[in-house]
Structure formats: C-alpha cells, structure tokens
C-alpha cells in the first residue's frame, strides 16, 4: 500500500479545482456560405478545418416515404454506384477507391444521400463521377440479383438478434407498418423487387429529383464552379417544399405491451419503451431535450446511474427523442439480462415516477446544463460536425435561431418547468412496452 | 507532421503535450501499459473488468462522473489485448478537472465491494450482449484458441469465459492495481487548446507526488511457429454457413506488419477489393467477405471471413479463397493496385488525424511502443512498401502450415 506520508500535499485532493461554468460559454454556430446552382439546387459550404480533407453530401428527397413498393428506396440508394452507361460497378468502385475516397450511400425516411469523403486534392477527379451516378445510373439486372440475394442473407442473420427485432417492432407499434417510420423489410419484400421499380424511382427522385448539397472541410477555391459545372445543368430541383406531399398514415398499435420470444435460448432481453412525441417545431421539444438528458440521455443520467451503475442489470441504457422530421417519439432502449428484464422495466417506470413526483435538485440540473453545453462545444469542433448541425436545421426546415434557442433553453429552464413536462409526458400508460428475448 | 513536447516526471510518468489552438477543447488521455495479454490464464477478462472499476470511485473522489460533467466533460475508456486507455474531453478552460480526476485514480482506488459487485454484473451483460446472445458471437474465442497455443492472445479481452469474471475478488483488484496502475507504467497525453508550460505546471501539481511504483517487466514467451494447418468444424444455431481463416503475421513495429496491413486492403478493403469483386460479385460464393488484421503489438493475425451464399459448398468457398491467395503469391500486384491501397491508407490517416482525441490516443500508443515520434513515421512506412514486398510476404504468411480454419455450419 502507499504510505500516508506520501499523500501529504499542499492542496486537497478531495476538493475539485475551480471551473469555468460551461453555461457561461458563448457558443457560436460557424456560418455557412449558401450558393445556388443554375438549376436552383442550393449548396451549403463550410470552409474550415486543419487537415486536407473534405466531404460532400448530396441529399435527395428519395427516402422510403416516396416509395410505392417496400424497400425500393433503400435498394435504389444502395445500387446507385453499381453501374452507369460508361462504367461498370467495379470501375466505379475502383475509381473512388483509387483516390483514397469513400463514397457511401444512406437511405432514411424523407431523404437519402450520397456522401463523399476525400482528400481535398482529389475532389476534382471525383465530383464529375458522382454527377454521372446521379444522371446516368443504369441498375443492371445482375447487380440487383446479387443485392437481393445478399440483403436477404443479411436480414436472416439480423432476425436472430433480439435488438434488431425489437427496434423494428417498436417503430411498427408507434407508427404503424403503413407509416414510413414504422415500415420494415421482409424477405418477401426483397424477392419482389424488380429492376423497373428501381429505374422508375431513380428517374423520379434522383435524376429529376429534389436535392440540396452540403460541403465541408478544407475546400479548394473553385469548389462552387466545380459543382456548378457537374450539377448545375442537371434536371435537378431545389429541395424546398419537396416533402410537402408525403402521406403519413399513422396507425399505432392498440396493444401497449408485448413480449416476443425470438430465441428460446436467449440470455438477454432487448427492451424498448416508447411513446409518441411531437417534432422539433413543437415548443416543448427543446425543453424535453434537457429533461431527457437527466432521465437517460447520457452516462451521468438517472437510468444509467440506477439500472447499470447501481444494479448492474445492463451494459448500457439510454433514452432519446427520435430523430424524425415529421412525427416523433421518446424512446428508452436497453439490452438487459433475461432474468432481470422485468425488474429493468419496473425501474424505467420508477424513474419516470420520480421525475413526475419530485423536483430535480439544482446541483443535478446544473450538472446536466454544463454537460450539455460542454458536449455541444465538443460537437462544434470540426467541419463535418458543424455541417451536420446545419444539415439537421435545413432538413427540418429550421434556421440558426433554433440552435440559439436550444442553448438558451439549456441555460435557463427551471426545475419546476421540467417537473411540469415530466407530468405532461412521462405517463406510463402512454408508453408502448416491448420486450424481445 | 504532428508536433508535440515531451517530459518525464520524477516518478517516471511520461507526459506528452500536443498543442492545437484550432479547437476549444482539451483531451486528457492516460494509457496504462497493461492489457489482457498480462492476465493470469485462470483469471482472464480481468484487465477489462478492472477498467470498469476505475470509474467506481478513487481514494479521495467518490464520484468520477459528476464533477467531470459539471466541468462540461465526457469520458470513456477501452481495453485491448495490449493496453488499457482512458480519455477525457472537456472545454480547455477546465483542463485541471480532468488532471485532478485522473491523478486521484492513479494514486489509489477506493476499492469498493459494491462497485466490484455491480461491475461484475455489468461486464457479464456486456459479455452476453456481444458474444453469447449473438449469432456467430463465439467465433473468435475458438479461433484464438486454435491459432495461439502459448501466447495470451489465445483469449479474448472480455475473458475466456463468464466464470472468470464472476469469480473476481477484491483482493485480485487490489493486486492488479498496485502492479500495473502507477506512474512508471503509464503515459499521459494532454492535447488541444492548451500550452505546454501550463500543462507542465498542472501535471507536476497533481501527478508528481504519486509514488512511482515498480516497473512491470513483461515476460511473455513468443508463440511457437505453427507447424501444420489447423482446422475446426462447428455446428450452431445460425442461419448461414460461414468460413473463417487466419494466419500469423508480424508484430506491430516490424516491416511485415505494414505489408500485411496493405494486403488486407488488397484483399478486402472496399468494393473494388479482390475478394469482394471475385467472390461476392463474380462468383457469388459469399454474401459478404472481409479481410482484416488486429493491429496487435505482438505477433498478430490476418483474417478472412465470409458468409456463404445458401447452397454453396464449403469446399468450393474455401478453394476460391485459396485461389485468390495463390494469385497474390504467384503474381506481383500492379502499380495501380499498390497505388490504390497506399492512397487509401494515406487518406485514412488524414481522416483519423482530424480528431484531437484520436491524435492524443495515437501519441500515447506510439510512446508506449517506444517513441511517440513513430506516429509520424507510420505514413512513410506504408508508402515504402513495394510490389515485391507484397509478393514475398504473401508467400511467407499464406503458407497452408500457417493457417487456421474454422468451418462454421448452420444446423438449421
């Protein structure tokens, strides 16, 4: 053991050093330069960063909300780079990889995207090929066949995982399977995909679709000209109003509680507990972000403190407001030991109860405020993260005022107001409770 | 070129400072020279369990998380077979809070029975979540045991089995702490919007009085050279047959390591890689295939794994992989292909360097390897790899006698 002698020091280790309260920080969202291409497509540019790296994110209104047949949006998005009239899938992949770049595709509910990460010095070799993908992708029958076969196999593996099944089923319960947020793919949906579905979807939502472009990093001086040259004369349209006509058929489940035995031998239960919640435009959204942090939003939250750090029922538990544009939800998510899954669910509701019944003490509230501001400061560090913030604002039809009002809410919301919100929303009867073993 | 300053405290703690005025944040990274390879074979998983206990209160500070959150900070940690690393990110103004917290848990833990009891359960749930309750979750337990007969890489960081974690006692925790967690066995990196003088002052204040401890001398026998091919068949409740192969490769600082890393790119890096193009796209034998290596300090493994398309025979799948390895052994890769994998590596390094947290972590790791400046030399070492290197090294490692194969059959 260490001798007590060696621990004698001129200062107290039990006393925290003085800090500057993060709530006193003045957070600034670095401004974006907004340009418009000849065809009306907007480009958000953020020229910052110390490394010679950059990213370009082409967002299309081509999410699953726009599909007439299930999984068509995701399949189209994935197969965009699997052949143009000029280049085969291999040649396209080789081109991007030769320059050390990454071309990823993602499909969400309203939007989908093509994202390029590259060294700034190579961007001029890559942008024209992305334009080729957007204007001349051909979706070869054979590529679709491979995609269908491999997607089905991947799905079969995922369906054995309780957390995968739970995440699908809770969305279906909250929104209904005919709602873009509740729909999920089955093996049959993949089998039913036809090349014509993809070609039609591509033509409407990419080639002649609504788009907005986000660019960040250490940018070459001619980046706007480069984008104008490759994209400015394509038949693309501005993203504004592109999501106006989406139909959201909400058909929430009638049963609030459900237990699914997916694997009789399973040693853990995937637990999802969720309620509907309004989107970012609702005046309670930013306030509930603070309440959510106290409840289960970070490692220092109550759910984590109680269910992991006190009871050891799980490796981790979090709650969050769902990142949706239209209808939202408030979700609690964890994988807990099978034998303690009922106890875990009980504690989740017990923590709701406490937030309703008791005023949050000032120290905990201050800690949460400071954590949230500190964390935000960290997230604003680096061009890609800042661009992500901007993208989120733009796609949710918000502007920087929203960012500053969120900060103001974090700094000023009172314990009384948080308790009022807990009473309004943390009502056990309004939550869906799903356990998948 | 990454700039840094370096000094050593009287108690042997090595300190590296990396100044970056472009960020409002600071990172405090403490790497301890201990990993799962330093464990007793009957008490595996301990280094990782111990990492959890580092958050359960230290001698003077009962709660690690709250004061850090109060200062606007976040933190995490990881354990590998080689090292254990703790990192904090917080607004640079509050850097002292991080140094206060890290120094106190380097001084001594609270050794609470309650914390041990809870973290045993938490780690058991982590074990279940990642390895038991997951299709194919046990693969690397089996492959490591097949590939290593002597070296402690034969068990996973999480531990060989759940019971080792469940049986951990407080006395083990104390022994482990005083053996490994002291200034002579640690490296502290402070990075971000800070100045070296300021860091020097604060580090002296909080760390200089910690007794240096005894330098831990690692004495791990090298894995004997494998003499013949090893194979294992498994049947499990999974939907698809899968094939796993791995080969012994060089250790982290050897030239062969860099060649092996580029070979993984040739074979499995991206959709234009050989295995993906030939076996997933052209021959359609696999629905996915990957090639990777573990980045370990001691002699590691290069692995190929893939799930077979339903109906494909295991032998056909394996032969097809062997054909690709044969190609690498017989024919030099082209200039263009070599340039591609080097460009990819150069770009991956540049993207990694964007984060001050990753830079701090890397500086600590290279210092642990012998010299933080090695970090800056890595890029050049990749660029120096030649076509002949790839050919010769492929011949060296893709020797059937150096191979370990796991045939993982679906019993459904």
Image (spheres, helix red, strand yellow):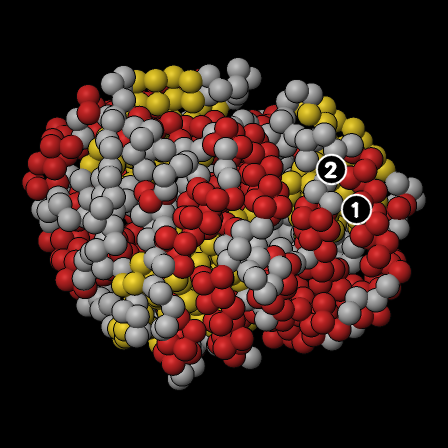
Residue B375 in sight in this render: no
In-front residue for pair B150/B344: B344
Whether residue A258 is situated above or below residue A348 in the rendered picture = above
Residue at which label 1 appears? B321
Measured in 3D between alpha carbons, the distance from the residue under mark 2 to the one under mark 1, in whole angstroms, is 10 Å
Residue A193 showing in the rendered view: yes
Residue at 86 percent across and 47 percent down: it is B402
CB within 8 Å, label 2 to label 1: yes
Left or right, residue A331 beside residue A358: right
Residue B354 horizontal side relative to residue A257, left or right: right
Disc 1 is attached to a residue of which chain? B
The numbered mark at residue B47 is none
Q: Residue B127: x, y in percent?
A: 55, 32
Image location (x, y in percent) of residue B147: 79, 41
Is label 2 or label 1 in front? 1
In the rendered image, which quarter is residue B377 located in? Answer: bottom right
Image quadrant assignment for residue B131: top right
Question: Which chain contains the residue that carries disc 2?
Answer: B
Q: Give the residue displayed 56% in from the left and 30% down from the top.
A: A156
Against B255, is A229 above or below? below
Q: Residue at x 83, y 47 (%)?
A: B322
- The residue at the point 45 percent across, 33 percent down is A185
């Amino acid at each position: 053991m260490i001798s007590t002698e060696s621990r004698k020091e001129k200062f107290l280790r039990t006393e925290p050093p003085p800090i500057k309260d993060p709530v006193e920080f003045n957070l600034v969202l670095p401004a974006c330069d907004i340009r418009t291409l000849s065809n009306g497509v907007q480009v958000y540019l953020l020229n910052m960063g110390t490394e010679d790296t950059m990213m370009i994110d082409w967002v299309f209104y081509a999410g699953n909300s726009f599909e007439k047949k299930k999984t068509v949006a995701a399949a189209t998005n994935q197969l965009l780079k699997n052949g143009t009239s000029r280049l085969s899938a291999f040649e396209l992949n080789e081109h991007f990889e030769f320059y050390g770049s990454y071309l990823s595709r993602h499909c969400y509910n309203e939007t989908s995207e093509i994202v390029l990460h590259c060294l700034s010095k190579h961007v001029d070799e890559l942008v024209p090929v992305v334009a080729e993908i957007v204007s001349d992708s051909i979706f070869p029958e054979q590529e679709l066949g491979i995609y269908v076969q491999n997607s089905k196999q991947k799905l079969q593996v995922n369906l054995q995982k309780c957390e995968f099944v739970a995440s699908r089923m809770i969305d279906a319960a909250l929104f209904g399977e005919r709602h873009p947020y509740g729909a999920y793919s089955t093996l049959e949906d993949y089998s039913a995909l036809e090349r014509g579905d993809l070609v039609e979807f591509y033509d409407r939502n990419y080639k002649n679709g609504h788009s907005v472009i986000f660019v960040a990093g250490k940018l070459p001086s001619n980046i706007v000209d480069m984008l104008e040259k490759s994209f400015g004369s394509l038949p693309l349209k501005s993203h504004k109003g592109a999501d106006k006509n989406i139909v959201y058929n909400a058909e929430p489940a009638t049963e609030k509680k459900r237990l699914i035995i997916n694997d009789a031998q399973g040693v853990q239960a995937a637990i999802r507990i969720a309620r509907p919640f309004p989107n970012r435009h609702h005046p309670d959204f930013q306030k509930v972000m603070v309440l959510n942090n106290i409840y289960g939003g970070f490692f220092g939250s109550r759910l984590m403190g109680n269910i992991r750090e006190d009871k050891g029922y799980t490796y981790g538990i979090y709650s969050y407001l769902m990142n949706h544009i239209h209808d939202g939800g408030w979700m609690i998510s964890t994988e807990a030991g099978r034998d303690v899954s009922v106890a875990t669910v009980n504690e989740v509701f017990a923590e709701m109860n406490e937030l309703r019944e008791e005023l949050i003490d000032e120290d905990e509230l201050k800690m949460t405020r400071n954590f949230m501001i500190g964390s935000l400061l960290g997230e604003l560090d680096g061009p890609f993260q800042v661009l992500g913030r901007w993208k989120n604002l733009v796609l949710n039809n918000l502007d920087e005022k929203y960012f500053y009002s969120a900060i103001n809410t974090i700094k000023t919301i009172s314990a009384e107001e948080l308790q009022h919100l807990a009473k309004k929303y943390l009502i056990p009867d309004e939550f869906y409770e799903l356990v998948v073993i | 070129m990454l700039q840094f300053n370096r000094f050593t405290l009287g108690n042997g703690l090595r300190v590296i400072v990396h100044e970056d005025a472009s960020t409002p944040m600071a990172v405090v990274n403490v790497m301890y020279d201990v990993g799962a390879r330093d464990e007793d074979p009957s008490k595996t998983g301990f280094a990782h369990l111990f990492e959890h206990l580092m958050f359960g209160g230290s001698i003077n500070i009962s709660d690690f998380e709250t004061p850090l959150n109060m200062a606007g900070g976040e933190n995490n940690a990881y354990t590998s077979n080689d090292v254990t690393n703790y990192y904090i990110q917080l607004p640079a103004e509050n850097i002292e809070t991080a140094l206060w917290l890290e120094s106190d848990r380097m001084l001594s833990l609270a050794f609470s029975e309650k914390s041990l009891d809870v973290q045993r359960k938490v780690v058991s749930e982590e074990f279940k979540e990642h390895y038991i309750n997951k299709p194919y979750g046990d693969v690397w337990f089996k492959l490591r045991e097949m590939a290593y007969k002597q070296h402690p890489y034969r068990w996973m960081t999480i531990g060989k089995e759940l019971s080792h974690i469940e049986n951990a006692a407080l006395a083990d925790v104390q022994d482990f702490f005083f053996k490994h967690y002291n200034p002579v066995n640690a490296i502290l990196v402070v990075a971000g919007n800070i100045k070296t003088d300021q860091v020097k002052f604060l580090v002296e204040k909080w760390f200089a009085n910690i007794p240096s401890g005894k330098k831990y001398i690692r004495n791990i026998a090298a894995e004997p050279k494998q003499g013949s091919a090893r194979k294992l068949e498994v049947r499990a409740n999974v939907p698809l047959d899968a094939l796993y192969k791995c080969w012994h490769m060089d250790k982290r600082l050897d030239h062969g390591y860099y060649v092996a890393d580029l070979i993984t790119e040739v074979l499995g890096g991206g959709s234009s890689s050989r295995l993906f193009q030939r076996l997933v796209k052209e021959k359609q034998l696999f629905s996915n295939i990957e090639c990777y290596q573990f980045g370990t300090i001691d002699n590691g493994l290069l692995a190929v794994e893939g799930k077979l398309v339903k109906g494909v025979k295991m032998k056909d799948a394996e032969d097809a992989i062997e054909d690709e390895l044969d190609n690498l052994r017989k024919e030099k890769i082209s200039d263009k292909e070599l340039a591609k994998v080097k460009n990819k590596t150069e770009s991956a390094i540049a993207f990694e360097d964007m984060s001050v947290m990753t830079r701090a972590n890397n500086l600590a790791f290279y210092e642990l390897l012998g010299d933080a400046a090695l970090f800056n030399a890595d890029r050049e070492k990749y660029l120096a790899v030649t076509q002949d290197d790839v050919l010769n090294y492929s011949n060296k490692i893709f020797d059937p006698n150096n191979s370990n194969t796991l045939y993982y059959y679906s019993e459904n």
